[in-house]
């Protein structure tokens, strides 16, 4: 665990060095300014969309940037011959990016919705959502040799991820979209902001996110060995 803690601290340092934390703060500042200038953005569904995009889209984007930077600087070549274990490397990336995105999302929620939040639901959902999409991004970037290649893969994967937004905005009411993990995240955000959701939806959301994380972690470890170590 000490090695993992050291890796997390190192990854946070790397995020700062590569200006990832600066970009996060910049994006946060833009959103906060929009909340102040355009109060209509505080409309709940639109606010949920903005906050959901933080752990999901930014997690996918920045895990790609971090790993590609390390590939380009040959850091991974050196790392695979060290005693660092695969699970330590993967969870270090996932946890460090989750810390950054969670802080940003909490600031956005407070600015856009105020203090009246279900903090337990909100923060736990942020953590699970971020972990899920960072792991997904790791799987994608481990098979990518360039930023362009990774961006193309992101464009393909973002379409199914975004489909549950149709349910959020009331354009559809499809149970089929419950097969997509982002539906679980959006439901929990609705519950955190005070909208009534059913007990079974809480069980579905937490259970499905945890199962999805376990599946993504399994494939992330395989990707680490098959496409990074080898």
Image (cartoon, helix red, strand yellow):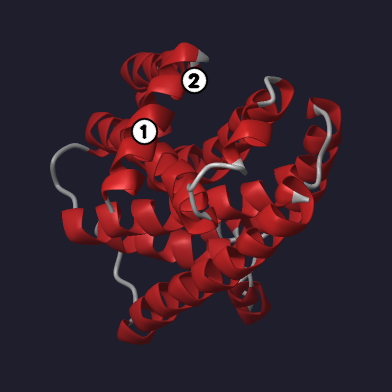
In the image: residue 14, left or right of residue 169: left
> For the residues marked 1 and 2, what is the alpha-carbon distance in whole angstroms?
9 Å
| Residue in the image at 49% along x and 20% along y | 20
In the image: residue 122, left or right of residue 208: left
Residue 125 drawn above or below residue 204: above
Circle 2 SS class: helix
Pointer 1 residue? 100
| Residue in the image at 54% along x and 35% along y | 58
Circle 1 SS class: helix
Q: Where is residue 145 in the image (x, y as percent from the top left)?
A: 84, 34
Q: Position of residue 212 (x, y in %)?
A: 55, 71
| Residue in the image at 13% along x and 41% along y | 115
In the image: residue 96, left or right of residue 214: left
Q: Give the residue furthest to the left.
A: 115
The reply to whether residue 31 is visible in this rendering is no
Nearer-the-camera pick, 54 or 43: 54
Q: Are marks 1 and 2 in contact (CB under 8 Å)?
A: yes
Q: Residues within 10 Å of mark 2 (few under 14, many from 20)?
A: some
Res 112 → quadrant? top left
Q: Where is residue 178 in the image (x, y as percent from the top left)?
A: 59, 75
Pointer 2 residue? 20
Q: Position of residue 146 (x, y in %)?
A: 83, 29
């Amino acid at each position: 665990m000490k090695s993992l803690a050291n890796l997390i601290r190192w990854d946070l340092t790397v995020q700062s060095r590569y200006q990832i934390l600066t970009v996060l703060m910049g994006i946060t500042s833009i959103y906060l300014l929009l909340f102040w200038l355009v109060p209509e953005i505080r409309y709940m569904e639109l606010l949920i969309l903005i906050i959901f995009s933080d752990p999901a889209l930014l997690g996918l984007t920045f895990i790609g940037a971090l790993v590609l930077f390390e590939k380009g600087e040959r850091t991974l070549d050196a790392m695979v011959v060290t005693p660092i274990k695969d699970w330590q490397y993967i969870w270090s990336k996932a946890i460090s990016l989750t810390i950054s995105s969670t802080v940003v999302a909490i600031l956005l929620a407070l600015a856009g919705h105020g203090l009246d939040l279900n903090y337990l639901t909100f923060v736990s959902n942020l953590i699970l959502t971020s972990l899920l999409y960072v792991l997904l991004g790791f799987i994608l970037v481990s098979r990518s040799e360039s930023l362009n290649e990774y961006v193309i893969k992101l464009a393909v994967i973002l379409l199914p991820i975004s489909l549950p937004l149709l349910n959020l905005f009331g354009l559809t009411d499809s149970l089929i979209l419950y097969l997509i993990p982002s539906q679980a995240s959006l439901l929990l955000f609705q519950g955190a902001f005070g909208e009534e959701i059913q007990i079974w939806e809480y069980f579905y959301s937490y259970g499905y996110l945890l199962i999805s994380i376990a599946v993504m972690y399994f494939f992330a470890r395989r990707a680490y060995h098959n496409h990074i170590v080898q």
